[in-house]
Image: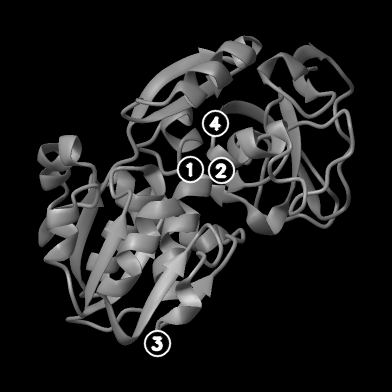
Amino acid sequence: MKAVRLYSYGDPSQLRYEETAVPKYGDNEVLVKMHATSINPIDVKIRSGAAKSRFSIEFPAILGRDLSGEVAEAGRNVQGFPKGMRVMALANGTYAEYTVAKADVLAPIPDALNFEEAGALPLVTTTGAQLIERAVKPKSGQTVLVTGALGGVGRTAVHVAQKHGAHVLAGVRTKEKEQASKLGVDGVVAIDSEEEVGHLHDLDAIADTIGGATIQRLLKTIRKGGVLGSVLGQPEGADKYDIHVEAFMAQPDASRLHQLADDVARHEFSIPIARTMKLQEIQEAHRIFERGGLAGKIVLVP
């Protein structure tokens, strides 16, 4: 099979599209023929070495977390995943024509979604849902600010927080305010504007997807006893405030992924796709991703 393998930490030139062996699968695992995956920030952090303290890999490594494809073979203990079934998952090693995943992380792809649409969903939707449901845990009527609300994780967090009855504010850059107003939120805040941030106070929670200096400026807007949920770890200086910080890393959840994919299929929210590229174009795809400015995800197809 063809796959993209990483031989050392560095720039996109370290990613090589080449022939390698089809992976072996165990008794409780499924071999999936990949039809689509997508690029996520963690892929770039692992490739560059920025995340090596959190994620240990052995070279040559196959990156990729989003799985969208069809069942090719299944282990002898696996039931409910017949050959040819369309499946999706938050998995590993998905920059390849075939990958292996444990059966319990696989979810069926809703009929209304194609492989490319499904390939954009697993990591960002799982992370966004868990940011709200496992970290922030808002009560109905509470006010939650979602930073980076137009990103994949942010869009999901907005959707899930609304489902839980929260009043949701979308935190975006000034130039994105008009676009963010289409999310159907209770308000839009330019979090790169000192003036607009100055009007925020007594927030019940912030669901943070961007970190850095922005979240440090926003810490003072959370009420005493409020919550900061973060996908990027505890921000510097957070311990100076009387708030509860809940930092986490997303874990596979097949049933929740299926529910979220159904919500996307019903047009309750969306994860836009900016570009679809071939897996063999991986170096250029990573360069485009790192330049930023895309209004959606880069999906990769074999």
Q: Callout 1: helix, strand or loop?
A: loop
Q: Residues within 10 Å of mark 1 (few under 14, many from 20)?
A: many
Mark in front: 4 vs 2: 4
Is 290 left or right of 52, judged from the image as shown? Answer: left
Residue depicted at x 34% and y 59% = 157
Q: Residue 215: image x %, image y %?
A: 38, 59
Q: Residue 145: image x %, image y %?
A: 26, 64
> Mark 2 — residue?
88
Q: Callout 3: helix, strand or loop?
A: loop
Mark in front: 3 vs 4: 3
For the residues labelled 1 and 2, say whether their Cβ atoms are less than 8 Å apart: yes
> Mark 3 — residue?
242
Looking at the rendered image, the quarter that the C terminus falls into is: top right
Residue depicted at x 52% and y 65% = 236
Of callouts 1 and 2, which one flags the residue occurring earlier in the amino acid sequence? 2
> Mark 4 — residue?
39
Of callouts 3 and 2, which one flags the residue occurring earlier in the amino acid sequence? 2
Mark in front: 3 vs 2: 3
Of callouts 1 and 3, which one flags the residue occurring earlier in the amino acid sequence? 1
Q: CA distance from mark 4 to mark 1?
A: 19 Å
Of callouts 3 and 4, which one flags the residue occurring earlier in the amino acid sequence? 4
Camera-side residue of 108 and 181: 181
Q: CA distance from mark 1 to mark 2?
A: 6 Å
Residue flagged by tag 1: what amino acid is it?
Answer: Ile
For the residues labelled 3 and 2, say whether their Cβ atoms are less than 8 Å apart: no
Residue flagged by tag 4: what amino acid is it?
Answer: Ile
Q: CA distance from mark 3 to mark 4?
A: 36 Å
Residue depicted at x 74% and y 34% = 99
Is 62 left or right of 219, judged from the image as shown? Answer: right
> Mark 1 — residue?
109
